[in-house]
Image (cartoon, rainbow, N blue to C red):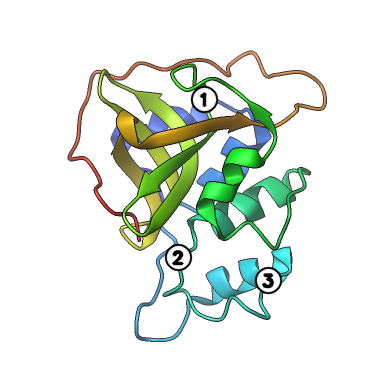
Amino acid sequence: MKLPDKYAWLNNEGAPRQLVEALMHYGVLEHPGKGSNPDIAAWAKEVGVSGWYTDDDIPWCGLFVGVVMKRVGYGFNANQLLAAKEWVKWGADRSIGKAKLWDILVFQRDGGGHVGFYVGENDHAYLVYGGNQSNAVGFAWIDKGRCIGVRYPLYKIGEPANVRKIVLSETGELSTNEA
């Protein structure tokens, strides 16, 4: 599915590899109450959690981040990837407030956590690209005050030059619950 025009600039970034991989899945939608989306079920199998991840009604933001990172060559603990807040232990720490393009952001939410990729920010919120955002892979504005961690991979050949802070002038309705 094509990105909305206001986010089409991401198609020209070309790096990091996890950005390119993740954007290929824009619009993947869960099938609540109708059986799982076969793509999401295949992700669970690919990362080794299909034995206990049985339905896309189960929060899958961590599953999405996990399959993206696996496909671009970065490991993780499959037993913890569905617990979104466990991603705060993954990779290397970048201080909250210092997030850069396609870092992994970890958030607190009622009933658990949420994890997704940094796209940009304004004064009050991060624009996050991730899975299980309105039951789909897509974009959501999340209040900066909910962020509990910023992580990035230990880049194998150095951090790409375009990995940077991105300030956006646009705003959107804040997400309050990504489950």
* Residue 59 rendering spot, x and y as whole percentages: 45, 65
Residue bearing mark 3: 49
Q: Quadrant of the C terminus?
A: bottom left
Farthest residue toward the left? 173
Q: Residue at x 72, y 67 (%)?
A: 46
Q: Is residue 108 visible?
A: yes
- The front one of 84 and 31 is 84
Q: Secondary structure at mark 1?
A: loop
Please tell me whether residue 109 is drawn above or below residue 102 in the rendered image.
below
Q: Amino acid at mark 3?
A: Val
Q: Earlier in the sequence, mark 2 or mark 1?
A: 2
Q: Residue at x 60, y 28 (%)?
A: 14
Q: Quadrant of the N terminus?
A: bottom left
Alpha-carbon neighbours of circle 2 within 10 Å: few (<14), some, or many (≥20)?
A: many
Q: Separation of disc 3 and disc 1 at Cα?
A: 28 Å
- The front one of 1 and 61 is 61
Q: Residue at x 45, y 35 (%)?
A: 148
Q: Amino acid at mark 1?
A: Leu
* Residue 3 rendering spot, x and y as whole percentages: 38, 43
In the picture provided, is 87 more to the left or to the right than 120? right
Alpha-carbon neighbours of circle 1 within 10 Å: few (<14), some, or many (≥20)?
A: many
Q: Earlier in the sequence, mark 3 or mark 2?
A: 3
Residue bearing mark 1: 101
* Residue 115 rendering spot, x and y as whole percentages: 48, 46
Please tell me whether residue 62 is drawn above or below residue 115 in the rendered image.
below
Tag 2 and tag 1, C-beta contact below 8 Å: no
Residue bearing mark 2: 59
Q: Separation of disc 3 and disc 2 at Cα?
A: 13 Å
Q: Amino acid at mark 2?
A: Pro
